[in-house]
Amino acid sequence: MTAIWTIARNTFKEAVRDRVLYLLLFFAGASIGLSQVLALLTVGDRVKIVKDVGLAAIAFFGALMAILIGTGLVAKEIEKRTIFTLLAKPIRRHEFLLGKFAGLVLVLLVMTGLMSLVLLLLVFAHTLTVDLKLLAAVFFLLLEFILLTAVAILFSCFSTPILSSLYSLGFYLIGHFSWSLVTLIKKMSPGPGRTVVRGLHLLLPDLEILNYKTEVVHGLPIPAAAWLAGPAYAVVYTAVVLAIAVLVFRRRDFV
Amino acid sequence: MSRVLELENVQKAFKLGFIPKTRQVLKGISLAVDEGEVFGYLGPNGAGKTTTIKCVLGLIFPDAGTIRMFGRSYLDPKAKAGLGFLPENPYFYDYLTAVEFLDFYARLFGIPAEVRSERIPRLLKMTSMERAADLPLRKFSRGMLQRVGLAQALINDPSLVILDEPLGGLDPLGRKEIRDIILGLRDAGKTVVFTSHILQDIEMICRRVAIIVGGRILSQGRLADLVSEKVLFTEITVSGVPEAELAAHGECVSEPGGRVMVKVYDEPGVEAVLESVRVRRARIHSLVPRTQTLEDIFVDMVKTT
Ligand SMILES: Nc1ncnc2c1ncn2[C@@H]1O[C@H](COP(=O)(O)OP(=O)(O)O)[C@@H](O)[C@H]1O
Ligand SMILES: [Mg+2]
């Protein structure tokens, strides 16, 4: 446990000393700020535009941080061979991965918190109220970021930093478009083809399960079941991905 | 005396290329290191020294063979608790300062705060790195990294220290300092294993050596047993004696300034050359009896494989 926490702390330290993180944070802030400009240019509900663009910016930059920092900090450790010295210490390999994961989740927590704060302040400037409902959408986004981090770690276990980022990006895109398979299934006539597509849909990630931005922006209720299904889906998916990562990592040669 | 590290018939092959071609890098390595000795692992570049060490550390998994450390399985974290390791090329976190870097590893061993705060400055002092304590490693030179790497290897007060080419990349003064640290470790009763492709390093500080060439241990034992004390030949440089006269006693090489170097293989030959010099009232410039060195053995071995 000490080992996991020590590695997590160090991972956090590395991330917050990395220029890439601040670059992403800067662009995230700028994008949220841009919603203000868009709001001024539009007629209609300005606050809705601010919320809409703001949440989209958090979603996009949060995912980017999860992927870039996740692959950066794990694959880099292998590529730069700092892992040699680390694994010579009395730690087990899974402790290394779990420590990395914990540290990265901590980074995402802080970064998402900062981005949300900017958005809340901006909305406050319009409405003079703190709209905590926004945090509901952010909560689901955070689950998505955590899952993406696990995926980034998994790919980092057997690939270079750049390839891992690309694979993780692929996972992200598939995750956001796999729901269209549902439409496809509805249109297909029963048969082996439909079974295959159904299986595919079950296997592929569905990140739209964690997307409640629209509901929050338009003040629609989030279905009660979502509060259970979303976290359950994210936790199980994350755990499975991490378990596979540990299995891959455990047998790997570090040359 | 107890076995600290024991390798038995360790084999490792690497697969290379798109259509994998296996390459046998370790062809059955057996080694035994006893408590309290400085053990030299010597071999030319590419012989398999680093690969052996990576097996011992559990960074790569051998295809066959057994490795035991402190009588335990080498993968047991309990065994690693007593181990210190310095990698061949120091790859470290460049965003940490020297103190943070040492603190990080100390925490991995679960070393309590009060011990950390005493030990870290002491190790920095020992490796002459106090002045760089708060500098990020990114600003370190190769030699500085080597030193802070050595400090890192000693952070848990290990009883076995494995150093992969610890003297590489250092200037003569730095080499001497690191050598002295290794000798200090020996005097403190620690077991040290270090690799080198440079003979002098090993000759100076090791009690026992193993010589690896092409993935095979060619020889292993006490340095004194491997290197015979016997005089192989004597090199005598003289002037004022005709070469033809000297040629009767050994091989001659003319040197500038009318000097002749004669290589004499036995004791009567040496006597005869000295007698010629005395009779002719000539001069002796040098007389060097040559014993066998590790280098000779090494060169012989590398040649025959
Ligand atoms: N990952 C690897 N894949 C293929 N060959 C390797 C790998 N690592 C090392 N080798 C080869 O194994 C041999 C031994 O390497 P190494 O143990 O680093 O030698 P040394 O440390 O004695 O200089 C070298 O010929 C090297 O090219
Ligand atoms: Mg080497």
Image (cartoon, coloured by chain):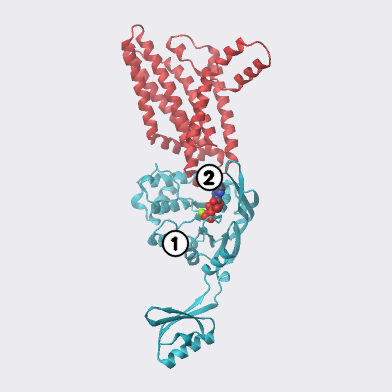
Chain colours: A red, B cyan
The answer to whether one can see residue B57 in this image is no
- What count of labels does the image hold? 2
B198 to the left or right of B24: left
Q: Is residue B161 above or below residue A186?
A: below
Q: Position of residue A37 (x, y in %)?
A: 31, 15
Instruction: Categorize mark 1 by other alpha carbons within 10 Å: few (<14), some (14-19), many (20+).
Output: some
Task: Tell me residue A170's x, y (percent).
Answer: 51, 26
Instruction: Please provide percent x and percent y for residue B27.
Output: 63, 55
Question: What mark, if any, has residue B179 been given in the picture?
Answer: 1
What residue is drawn where x is 50% and y is 88%?
Answer: B271
Q: Identify the residue under disc 2.
A: A87
In the displayed structure image, the side of residue A40 where residue B70 appears, left or right: right
Instruction: Kindly identify the amino acid type of the residue bearing the numbered disc 1.
Output: Arg
* Badges 2 and 1, same chain: no
- Label 2 CB-ligand 1 distance < 8 A: no
Image mark for residue A241: none
Q: Residue furthest right?
A: A191
Separation of residues labelled 2 and 1 (CA atoms):
26 Å
Q: Residue at x 39, y 35 (%)?
A: A18
Q: Secondary structure at mark 1?
A: helix
Q: Nearer the viewer, residue B111 or A200?
A: A200
Marks 2 & 1, CB-CB < 8 Å contact: no
